[in-house]
Image (spheres, rainbow, N blue to C red):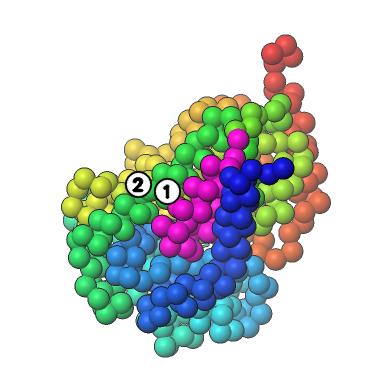
Amino acid sequence: MESSDETNGAAALDTLRTAARDPRGYVGRWRAEHPGRKVLGVLPMNFPRELAHAAGVLPVIVADDQQPVTEGRAFLPEFYCGFTRNLADQAATGRFDLYDGLFVADHCIQLLGATDIVRELEPRAPVFLGQLISSLNDISAGAKIAEMVATLRTEVESFAGRTITDDALRASIRSFNRDRALMRRVFDARAAGDTCFSPVELQDVVASAQAMDPDEHHRLLSAVVAAREPRPRDDRIRVHLSGHLCHAPRRELLEVIEEAGAVVVDDDLWTGRRYLQAMVDESTPPLEAIGRWYAERNVAVPCPTRVQHDVDWDRWLLDAAERSGAEAVVHLMPKFCEPHMLYYPELRRALDTAGLPQLLVETEHEGIPLESFRTRLEALVERTHRNRPAYA
Ligand code: SF4
């Protein structure tokens, strides 16, 4: 018979899964429970959601809703990534009505293009683009980040119709940090050898955190974690998943990886460790702390849309693989994701030099060639097996 912990944990995971896969349903419920409060759509990957939360707004990271691109096709070129084309489609077909406004703090050129389309197609929803400096070695980077974070605060206040006090901001920082810290505990346990969560479950955990109020998410995730017993790793090939910026890889891909005889031990995906790795310092004045959080995110998990000469994604990847014992890397690259494409040769060279087997999988918004992916993964697993010492 199941214990009450297990029953609560299963019900809590079900709620997280539902919020991850149906943010519209979650937002509808939140609106009903918080009449008169606004919902802000924020685009990945750098908007400090704490600012909106402190203003009484629900900040939801806009997700690729996995619908086929139809009317949105007319607004962006075919060579834009699936996420941005899906975004244009959400605006073109009225699915963007979920949000009262849109805030962006990024600088991928395709994301900026998609933001302009939303602005054009959704005139009822204010759109604010606050570009945080991408060159983090720039001598004026600190001042420019501080200036932009202050502007974001003012813009959010005007959107929410409410002043953000330092106390409210500190409380929001604590809420998001607490939720991130719990997710980090789960991810760190996986990297250390615990396999009690599948990659699809972890993706649901992070994707739901990107949509939900952090206190509610934390309460549910605490119940999930309390109900799970650690499960030691078996002998499957240990794989690190890398890339897939801005949106979640299809769940079928994650399932096929483990069906092919591998176990995912760590990742740097946006719907994974990239989202939760950096904390906001609770001991410094809150606006300053948010600026530092932005600058330090690139150290926590390097991002190809940022420049920082002393931080390398390839070096980070090798260190992460060493920490988790990953024996192979699967690069998940959304088709036409320019920042990832630009960094990929360096990643490939560094892993080749280190003798780590790797596989590049280019993902599509629609129509994934699952069987060909399965065959290539099985080949990677076999190749990696040959790397293992004969007598371990
Ligand atoms: S970083 Fe990549 S996935 Fe994100 S919007 Fe830009 S091209 Fe698309």
- Percent from the top left, x then y, of residue 309? 34, 41
Chief secondary structure of the magenta portion:
helix
Depth order, front residue of 1/153: 1
Residue 174, x across and y down, in percent:
31, 52
Q: Is residue 180 above or below residue 354?
A: below
Residue at 67% across / 61% down in the picture?
364
Q: Is residue 337 above or below residue 7?
A: below
Q: Nearer the viewer, residue 230 or 356?
A: 230
Assess whether residue 20 is covered by the magenta stretch. Answer: no
Q: Residue at x 62, y 78 (%)?
A: 73
Give the quarter of the figure containing the C terminus: top right
Q: Quadrant of residue 35?
A: bottom left
In the image as oriented, which residue stretches furthest toward the bottom?
A: 124
- Where is mark 1, residue-wise? 180
Q: Amino acid at mark 2?
A: Met
Q: Nearer the viewer, residue 47 or 32?
A: 32
The picture places residue 264, in percent across and down from the top left corner, at 63, 39
Q: Name the residue beneath numbered marker 2.
A: 279
Q: Residues within 10 Å of mark 1 (few under 14, many from 20)?
A: many
Q: Which residues are magenta?
A: 202-229
Locate the N terminus and report the quarter of the image it occupies. top right
